[in-house]
Image: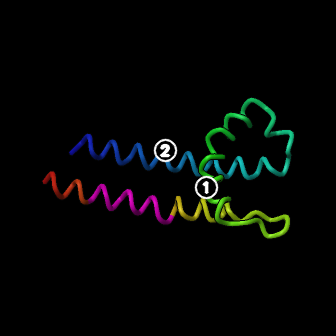
Amino acid sequence: MFILNLIYIAAEYAINIFSILLIIYILMSWVPASRETTIGRWIGKIAEPYLGFFRKFIPPLGMIDISPIVAIFVLRYLIVPGLYQVYSMIASLIR
């Protein structure tokens, strides 16, 4: 049970760190030269595959791209609760 708790906590921390990286990547779009730095390219390699999935389905509204907002919403309000549900189901099976 202890290992299951550690896995759940680690996954939740990873999702929080990924959320922060997404926000940083979105803010970096305001300064385009920042995406050309080593850190900017590194964050782009991590964030762009996830954001690209949402950009396929949500077109930009003029100059405004709302797909990152939807991507963060899905991460925070669908994936995190889903992770908790999986954790709860596995924990109830172990007991």
Q: Is 18 located above or below residue 40 in the figure?
A: below
Secondary structure, magenta segment, majority class: helix
Give the residue pinned by disc 1.
53
Residue 66 quadrant: bottom right
**Left-right relation of 11 to 22:** left
Provide residue 58's location: percent of width, then percent of height: 68, 66
Count neighbours of disc 1 (C-alpha within 10 A) and say few if under 14, some if 14 to 19, many if 20 or more: few
Quarter containing the N terminus: top left
Tell me which segment is drawn in magenta. Answer: 77-88
Under mark 2, the amino acid is Ala
Residue at x-position 24% and y-position 42%:
2
Give the residue pinned by disc 2.
14
Distance, label 1 to label 2, CA atoms, is 19 Å
Tell whether label 2 touches label 1 (CB within 8 Å): no
Provide residue 82's location: percent of width, then percent of height: 39, 61
Residue 84 quadrant: bottom left
Under mark 1, the amino acid is Phe
Secondary structure under tag 1 reads helix
Residue 56 counted in the magenta span: no
Disc ID at residue 31: none
Q: Earlier in the sequence, mark 1 or mark 2?
A: 2
Could you say which is closer to the camera, residue 2 or residue 44? 44
**Left-right relation of 80 to 32:** left
Q: Is 64 located above or below residue 90 in the figure?
A: below
Provide residue 90's location: percent of width, then percent of height: 23, 54
* Residue at the bottom extreme, as displayed: 61
Provide residue 80's location: percent of width, then percent of height: 44, 59
Residue at x-position 44% and y-position 50%:
12
Could you say which is closer to the camera, residue 49 or residue 94? 49
